[in-house]
Image: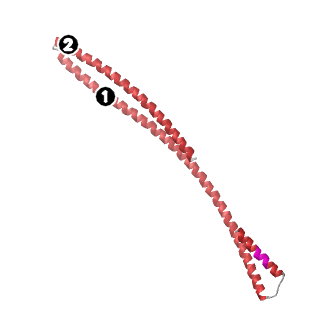
């Protein structure tokens, strides 16, 4: 069950890696598109600045406007860089969130499997304990039987010592008791 869970976890991990690669590829494409757009925007700005600079030679009054335009473009560029950084951070957080959710789901599934396995093992332990208790009870019963046979043997032996004669049936009973004791010892 654990091997199955482990293989399932590895498959899920491989699938997550593929998804992560896909997301990273999409991020790379988006970043390239953003950079191309940024480059085009910068080229357009450069053309505007060049045109404004050209006009400066024509009109001195446009110098002030050019400075204001440059400052505005610098602020815009700064804001665009900030926006790109924030967008990248948002994308990273989303990916981390997806990975965390996926890991949480895997861990929840693994926990459920482990709890089920633990319950199964507990049931097996209870079953084995019942069997052990039953075997102990059988052993106690056999021990009681052996003790009873030992007492009978002791009584018969005592009776046999008082009489030195051959008592025929008592000796046969004595031999039967000895045989039962040996049989009980073998079973125990």
Does residue 175 belong to the magenta stretch? yes
Does residue 181 belong to the magenta stretch? no
Given residues 38 and 90, the one toward you in this image is 38
State the mark number for residue 81.
1
List the single residue furthest toward the top.
58
Q: Which residues are magenta?
A: 174-179
Q: Position of residue 47 (x, y in %)?
A: 26, 16
Residue 29, picture quadrant = top left
Question: What residue is rendered at 45% in x and 32% in y?
Answer: 21
- Quarter holding the C terminus is bottom right
Left-right relation of 5 to 158: left
Q: CA distance from mark 2 to mark 1?
A: 29 Å
State the mark number for residue 55.
2
163 w.r.t. 41: above or below: below
Q: Position of residue 20 (x, y in %)?
A: 45, 34
Question: What residue is rendered at 62% in x and 55% in y?
Answer: 124
84 w.r.t. 167: above or below: above
């Amino acid at each position: 069950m654990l091997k199955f869970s482990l293989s399932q976890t590895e498959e899920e991990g491989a699938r997550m890696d593929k998804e992560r690669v896909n997301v990273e590829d999409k991020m790379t494409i988006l970043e390239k598109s953003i950079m191309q757009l940024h480059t085009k925007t910068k080229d357009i700005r450069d053309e505007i600045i060049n045109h404004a600079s050209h006009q400066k030679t024509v009109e001195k009054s446009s110098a002030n406007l050019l400075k204001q335009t440059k400052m505005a473009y610098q602020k815009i560029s700064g804001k665009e860089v900030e926006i790109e950084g924030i967008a990248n951070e948002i994308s990273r957080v989303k990916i981390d969130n997806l990975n965390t959710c996926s890991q949480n789901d895997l861990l929840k599934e693994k926990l459920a499997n482990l709890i089920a396995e633990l319950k199964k093992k507990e049931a097996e332990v209870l079953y084995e304990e019942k069997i052990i208790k039953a075997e102990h009870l059988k052993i106690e019963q056999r021990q009681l039987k052996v003790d009873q046979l030992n007492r009978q043997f002791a009584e018969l032996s005592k009776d046999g010592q008082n009489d030195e004669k051959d008592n025929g049936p008592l000796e046969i009973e004595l031999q039967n008791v000895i045989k039962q004791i040996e049989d009980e010892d073998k079973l125990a």
